[in-house]
Image (spheres, coloured by chain):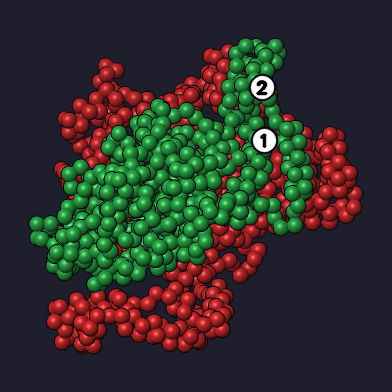
Chain colours: A red, B green
Amino acid sequence: MRNLVSILLCAALLANAAPIDPREEAFIGARRSYWAFQKVARPPLPSATANPIDAFILAGLKARNLTPSPEAEKRTLIRRATFDLTGLPPTQAEVDAFLNDTRPNAYEQLIDRLIASPAYGERWALKWLDVVRYADTNGYELDAERPQAWRYRDYVIDSFNTNKPYDRFLMEQIAGDELYPGQDKALIATGFLRAGPRHVVGGNLDEEVNRQEVLLEMTLGVSNTFLGLTVGCARCHNHKFDPITQADHYRIQAIMAATDLKEIDLPALGAKAQYEAAKKAHEARLKPIQDEITAIEKPIREQLREAKKAMLSQAHLAALDIPKEKRTEEQETLFKEASKQIGVSWDEVVNAIPAEPKARRAALRARMHAINLDEPEPPPAAFAVANMDQAPQTHILKLGEPKHKLSPVEPAFLSVLGAIEAPKGPGGRRAAFAKWLADPQHPLTARVMANRVWQFRMGTGIVPTPNDFGQLGGRPSNRPLLDWLAAEFVSSGWNVKHLDKLIVTSATYRQSAAIDPAKAAIDADNKLYWRMNQRRLEGEALRDNILLASGKLNSKQFGPPIKTPIEQEIYDIIFTEAEPDNLWPLPKDRSEIYRKSIYLLNKRTVRLPLLTNFDQPDAISSCPVRAVSTHALQALSLLNSDFLHEQSQALAARVSAACPADADCQTRAAYSITLQRPPRPEEQQLARQFLTQKRMPLEDFCKALLNRHEFVYIP
Amino acid sequence: MSSSTSHNRRNVLKAGLGGIAAEWLLQRDLLAQSPLAAKPPHFAPKAKRVIFLFMVGAPSSIDMFDPKPALAKYAGQKLPASFGKVISQFTGGDTGLLPSPWTYKQYGQSGIPVSGLSPHVAQCVDDICFVRSFYTESVVHAPAMYQVHSGRVLTGYPSMGAWVTYGLGSPADNLPAYVVMPQPEGTPEGGTPCWSSGFLPAVYQGTLLRSGPSPILHLKPPAGVTPERQQDTLDLIQQMNRMDSRPGDSEHAARIASYELAFKMQTAAPEAVDLNKETEATKALYGLDDKKTYDFGSRLLLARRLIERGTRFVQIYSGGGPVSIQWDAHKDLVANHEKMAGMTDKPIAGLLKDLKARGLLDETLVIWGSEFGRLPMSEGGNGRDHNPHGFTMWFAGGGVKGGRIVGETDEFGLNGIGQRYHMRDFHATILHLMGLDQHKLYYLHNGRNEKLTDFGGTVIDKVFI
């Protein structure tokens, strides 16, 4: 009887299911019973605890004869939670208020305040943008900027701040254009499908190969981000470890086969005509300068051309003078060759200009670049997608080669989960896919996101590989907890803030991070969470924390990405074959260079050393968990970079404004700003030695604090 | 950590803590070692370090190391129809054949032919193994550069130097393990992905190095900060960080060690790049006495000084920035290659001779190559378009059998024929010479054990057996 019921239930769920090819079924076979493909059933609580999370953790610990660590001290708790939820430390006043708040719900009140902060969405965006490998440029050699892409970054920040239900968040990103027509935000959300790198270059490139790269990036994006499966591995052959067939890979590609990349005007946000007028006025300002530059270059260019002409063969020279309509085929070839041979490049011209006009030209170009800082913003558009009129047929590709087409496939989802088919027309494929993913019964969607929230707050995932719930990924260290979180997530209405609050108010999260060697000997990697994990600030959060300490942080939200000063060595690696001036124009309003890191231009091939040294991912493939490497170049950037030097000086200025002469007072002020606590006696003593006895500059003391473990780690 | 301190620590710990807990702490100590600490290879290596000379924009193999007399015979004629359509970037392969403007002579005991573009390297042919039948997948510079550097035409994969340092670490703890020296005029078209660590930890990415007082980014204290001030600040940092360190916390320990290393690097790196320590004769050998060869020669001499001091992998670019400073001779092949070869030929020969004289060549693998070669037909009458179908790269030192030619191209130099070698074979060979098994050097990334050679390449054993 029970069997019959479950068969009926299955049949109901798979109403749209297409019959599975018997060979594919044979490949999937028993692996259908793998844990991650089973529906989530909310497990019973193992014991009664104030926060259900703790009941599951305690059960896990007990099984290994472990006990949890004591609760961290209050100062640690407020710093930990504030870093985690806003990306920045609390102020000294906030710490003091919390320490003096003896109400039983003081911590919960704190969490409510932090989760409501506008910085909450910025913090989440850092995490989410890693997963979707967002950047502001295309990548590859030309690595051009994507002028409207930032609206997707802002959409992500706004979505987390307004606590958009995750199912809606998912559906907007995959099919916002289809499911919510006419809604700007939903259209901007589809920038998700274009977040990855894209090879844009001239020459004889094969369109079919290019398109395959685009489809592959989209497939990787949806499968890494939402499915938590490595569908990309089934591109050349059936997946080696998971029941994902090669046909499945191309069925998911087929979901996107009719999806075109498109910039779509957002007329609601601004007037196009106004922009056209502003652009004309801007060009009129540039014109006289450009004319002057041309006047300097033209005679030189002519001279060089004449010199090259003098080197041409008679036949080539003659061909140049024959009008196009009179050239024979041979003369046409000669003409083309001759034209190529007498071409003059910019560097040949610049090298040949005498010193005086050369200097004048450089000054003119500088003026031109300065005026270009006022270039009007392009009219708002969504970096989005749109459906084609007809859907091209998708084929399985032999070894992923677009030239080697095998059988055709129709858009459908994963066979192991029922092979539900999507519409065959160009429209609605993505909508059907998004709805399938957002189904509360889907075994992966909620688990994958619940695990990401947990990993984000706890430092490690319950499944340690958040993008890979398959065989090669890690097994859940506490499956009942994962399932409970997933069930709770869905029943709360896919409420991310609810899940976040549950986690950060748990006793598990509030444990001390101290290492007990006896417990570590049992569970060295803290898989069972017998303590809190200490986590290093990401490069971005470290930069923001430094700017907050120096008093320079500009907390303005949203808008186009900002270029912040870079070292000459970094400027020099920006690839260009053109004149390498003005490759990195800094904003006119210099307070913009101190914006939070989430608003800095993320250029795929030119990384900021401070960020990349601290393991900022390359935005080329999805990064579910950042590496934490420790090496000497980190120390060098925190000791010697201009950025650290300037911020140390600014911090010193802040400190001496508070305490002009008294070294003890300065020490207290510097500790309060950077670590939000008073110095301990031995620290006061150390500071006295440094500042008073050795008479070292206050800025060096400040720099040392910015280098300190305690400053760099979330406690 | 030396074994004796480790032993002492073991005793102290065992006295104070339970056995298992103490063992755990010791393990953590090991983890606190630099991720670049030297690691044993998979088997006995022939080469311990690599100097990779990369010619940006693609030199023409048939005009340097692979003579094609047929081009003179059929000058101006089209390739026989049997060759089919030729794929290249800008031309369709339907223009006339362009004979090499240079003449070839035979050199050394091996009698290997070298064109007039490389009179100095020609003197070293008995130490060089030329592989003439490499092919690659893209006709476009950047993707082909990604393939020769990282095994794929896509970005996001670790470069060869990153894989080698990930696999072997580095014997030098006071210098970067993997150093990159681009052309001063600009970066190669492929840009930073050519030395990226891809999905490997950032510590394995190539470190840019330039000559001068601050060879590495942020190596020197900011203007106005004296070394004494720097030392005192560093002392304060280390004192505070020791206060913050918790027992058993390997990350804290590693961080303290990284500051020590940074400090050592501040002394070691400027010394390593100080070319004034070299004799005039050595400088002249690398062409430092000539404006034309000064820059490239300086970078090669730097490379020798770095590998002497333990750097594992040095990558040097000839060409970058404006088209006129690349080997990309779409027009005026003669002027372009005379200029580019003029800047590099003498220094490269100087490097080989110098390494040999110092007994370093035996264990130093020197590789000369590019993203592809150039077509036998003309482009624009006096240039050549890209040829990914058959081109030459060469190896010297590090167990390589010199005076050899491996593989061949057809009579026009268009396609590799017979045994052709893919970039994965190039990589498999280099890893093998370094004592690394291409199948054992992997990293789990997004569900897949990724390798430099992906599905695996063929070790070109004719290079070294």
In the image, is A700 to the left or to the right of B23?
Answer: right
**Local crowd at mark 2 within 10 Å, few (<14), some, or many (≥20)?**
few
- Secondary structure of the residue carrying tag 2 is helix
Amino acid type, label 1: Ile
Residues marked 1 and 2 touching at CB (< 8 Å): no
Q: Quadrant of the C terminus of chain A?
A: top right
Instruction: Decide which of B378, B194 is in the foreground and name it.
Output: B378
Q: Identify residue for label 2.
A: B5
Amino acid type, label 2: Thr
Chain containing the residue with disc 1: B
Tell me: residue B116, above or below residue B307. below
Q: Residue placed at 30% from the left, 51% from the top?
A: B107
- Secondary structure of the residue carrying tag 1 is helix
Q: Quadrant of the N terminus of chain A?
A: top left
Instruction: Decide which of A569, A626 is in the foreground and name it.
Output: A569
Percent position of residue A67, x then y: 62, 17
Instruction: Decide which of A638, A684 is in the foreground and name it.
Output: A638
Q: Residue placed at 26% from the left, 78% from the top?
A: A338
- Name the mark on residue B256: 1
Tell me: residue A336, above or below residue B119. below
Instruction: Decide which of B196, B315 is in the foreground and name it.
Output: B315
Q: Earlier in the sequence, mark 1 or mark 2?
A: 2
Q: Residue placed at 20% from the left, 37% from the top?
A: A18
Chain containing the residue with disc 2: B
Percent position of residue A652, x then y: 79, 53
Marks 1 and 2 sit apart, C-alpha to C-alpha, by 17 Å
The reply to whether residue B199 is visible in this rendering is no
The nearer-to-camera label among 1 and 2 is 2
Instruction: Check chain identity for marks 1 and 2: say if they share one.
Output: yes
Percent position of residue B432, x then y: 36, 34
Residue at the extreme front = B109
